[in-house]
Image: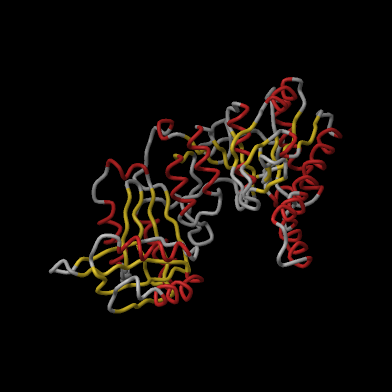
Amino acid sequence: MKFGGTSVADVERIRQAARHVKREVDAGNEVAVVVSAMSGKTNELVGWVNSASRLHDAREYDAVVASGEQVTAGLMAIVLSDMGIPSRSFAGWQVPIHTDDAHGAARITGIEPEALTSRMAEGIVPVVTGFQGVSPSGRITTLGRGGSDTSAVAVAAAVGADRCDIYTDVDGVYTTDPRIVPKAQRLNRIAFEEMLEMASLGAKVLMIRSVELAMAHKVRLVVRSTFDDPDAPQIAPDGTPGIPGTLVCDEEEIMEKQIVSGVTLAKSEAKITLRDVKDKPGVAAAIFGTLADQSIVVDMIVQNISDDGATTDITFTVPESEYDKAVATLEGAGDRIEYAKLSGSKGGAKISVVGVGMRSHAGVASSMFKALADKGINIQLITTSEIKTSVLIDEQYAELAVRALHTYYGLDKQ
């Protein structure tokens, strides 16, 4: 059971989360808990580090920032024990959760589960600090963005858990953002691949790294709300007794595969086009390698070759915040990249439709284009994969496009 920052924002919310743990223990389950820092605490700690010194040692940064989860884990263990549930807190290094030594953005390399499984077998609930581990040299490390979700999935895989419940401030994964489309539906089940695409395309419910890890280790995830009444009967989204929220699982567990499961929106996209690029081996590597050297993330890429095959136009998108840097980088690399003209624009939005059912249904992309055309929305770029189609449009039409597609594919709540 993993509880995020808003779920443990203060002692009262920790008590609410602990009641969810008690329900599972009372049901006869062996439980391990993973916690984030209290909401806002990590940012506060990072601020303290930066005000102490801009040029700080990354190892000491981790030592400071990791303390947020340690406070939460200790408080959760105290609250659980007060409820009559034996509990003990574990820092990442005590488990231990082994990582590499990339301080601030470490990756988990292995977990020794015996300390946790032995306590669970004794009826003790271990409360583990998320977001952190221990390096080969014995230093505390932090895992970077989405680290607590990743910790929870890794712990679940290590102890052989039946599932990993991710408690957050929403009650599941929706077909799109309910703030844009009030008729958005909560999904009962979603495949790992669909969740991975949706997370990478702007859905903020789960972080990409945690979904990748869950998919690799076949760890079933449940996204559910901490703010549901812990004492209420457990009712699944379809109204039957079961687990509330959304189950993220293997595609084989989903009987009815919808053609489209969700519509996502990513705003603040910028488009760059290089015209009349010399079409020769290594040109794409030179362009995108130059951008990668500056840590600029490139997303959608479309290439058009001229009739004579001598030149090509290459168009791609970058985050709007990186646009000026990307343009300056490419203009500064003119001696290595031969092109006639560079043009671009900000103010784009990427709209995507996602669904494992697209594998076995033809015409999803063309129907998407028709739905947008019917609303007078012009498409600037198109990219597709086996279970996803994405388009770049003007940001001013973004929410209209999401609502139109959500209705077109029958995702509106009846």
In the picture, measured across the screen, residue 271 lies left or right of residue 33, that is: left
In this picture the colour scheme is secondary structure
Query: Residue extending furthest right?
Result: 82
Place of residue 63 in the rendered image (x, y in percent of width and height, measured from the top left):
76, 50
Q: Foreground: 395 or 381?
A: 381
> What's the residue at 79%, 51% (across, down)?
10
Classify residue 227 as left or right of residue 409: right
**Percent coordinates x, y for residue 27 in the rendering:** 69, 25
Q: Image height check: is 398 above or below 117? A: below
Identify the residue at image location x=86%, y=34%.
82
Along the line of sight, the residue nearer the viewer: 414 or 53: 53
Left or right relative to 115: residue 110? left
Q: What residue appears at the point 72 percent right and 45 percent down from the top-left corner?
A: 140
Which image quadrant is residue 23 in? top right
Give x and y (percent) for residue 205. 56, 50
Q: Which residue lies most toward the front here? A: 335
Question: Observer-nearest residue: 414 or 370?
Answer: 370
Above or below for 337 versus 217: below
In the picture, residue 152 is in which quadrant? top right
Which residue of the protein is positioned furthest toward the left in this rendering?
Answer: 308
Give the answer, above or below, for where 414 lies relative to 334: above
Instruction: Give percent across and percent down for residue 100.
Output: 61, 43
The N terminus - image quarter: top right
